[in-house]
Amino acid sequence: MNSESTVYDLGCGRGRAAFLFHFLTGAKVVAIDLVGPFIVTARRLAKWMGCDQHVLFCYENFLNSDIEKADIVYACALCLSQETREALASRLQGCRDGTYLVSVGWNPNKPWLHSLESFSTSFSWGEAPVYLKQIRFNEAPLDE
Ligand SMILES: C[S@@+](CC[C@H](N)C(=O)[O-])C[C@H]1O[C@@H](n2cnc3c(N)ncnc32)[C@H](O)[C@@H]1O
């Protein structure tokens, strides 16, 4: 992730991770959540911090979002239902080949999702596993 990257934060809440990504790396972030008050608060914070041109908050269901422009998709999936996870995994097929996926608390398994790394790390709410993957539609999966 760097200043050339476009990161999609799916289920961004009030933007905690989205702001971190931008301020740590300079990445442009498109952050999506379907809870209106979260988006209102996040937009206010972005304006207050002067990053509202770089961290864009969208009030929508990420299952309907066009994520084709993403270089990196971040999904903190701990609280997502199995059904939403499955729908999201299918949705990822709308990404470009080579797009990276960072998922927290969920290890999606698709033949075109290549595992790069996984580790456990601390969040404000406690410890959670993180899975780094890359979308490669035209390659056989690596041994996991
Ligand atoms: C665990 S919280 C994410 C917290 C946030 N990423 C952070 O770092 O503080 C999950 C979020 O996903 C959102 N969410 C769940 N399903 C969604 C959907 N289909 N479309 C958009 N947002 C969704 C919830 O509203 C919630 O804010």
Image (cartoon, rainbow, N blue to C red):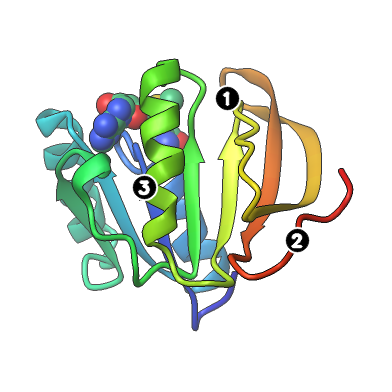
Query: For the point 34% across and 40% down, which residue is it?
Result: 12
Residue 138's place in the image compared with 114, above or below, is below
Q: Is residue 62 left or right of residue 106?
A: left
Q: Is mark 2 within 8 Å of ligand 1?
A: no
Q: List the residue tagged with mark 1.
A: 124
Give the Cα distance between marks 2 and 3: 20 Å
Q: Is residue 35 left or right of residue 62?
A: left
Dot 1 alpha-carbon crowd within 10 angstroms: few under 14, some 14 to 19, many 20 or more: few
- Mark 1 residue element: loop
Q: Is residue 38 left or right of residue 31?
A: left
Dot 2 alpha-carbon crowd within 10 angstroms: few under 14, some 14 to 19, many 20 or more: few
Query: As rendered, which of 93 and 20 lies closer to the eye?
Result: 93
The image shows residue 62 at horizontal and vertical percentages of: 26, 43
Q: Quadrant of ligand 1?
A: top left
Q: Residue 122, located in which quarter of the rendered image? A: top right
Give the Cα distance between marks 2 and 1: 37 Å
Residue 92's place in the image compared with 83, above or below, is below
Type of the residue with mark 3 = Arg
Q: Is mark 3 within 8 Å of ligand 1?
A: no
Q: Is mark 1 within 8 Å of ligand 1?
A: yes
Q: Residue 137, located in which quarter of the rendered image? A: bottom right
Query: For the point 51% across and 80% down, which residue is it?
Result: 3
Q: List the residue tagged with mark 3.
A: 91
- Mark 1 vs mark 3: which is more N-terminal? 3
- Mark 2 vs mark 3: which is more N-terminal? 3
Quadrant where the image shows the C terminus:
top right
Q: List the residue tagged with mark 2.
A: 140
Pointers 2 and 3 in contact (C-beta within 8 Å) = no
Query: For the point 69% across and 41% down, which residue is it?
Result: 131
Residue 89's place in the image compared with 107, above or below, is below
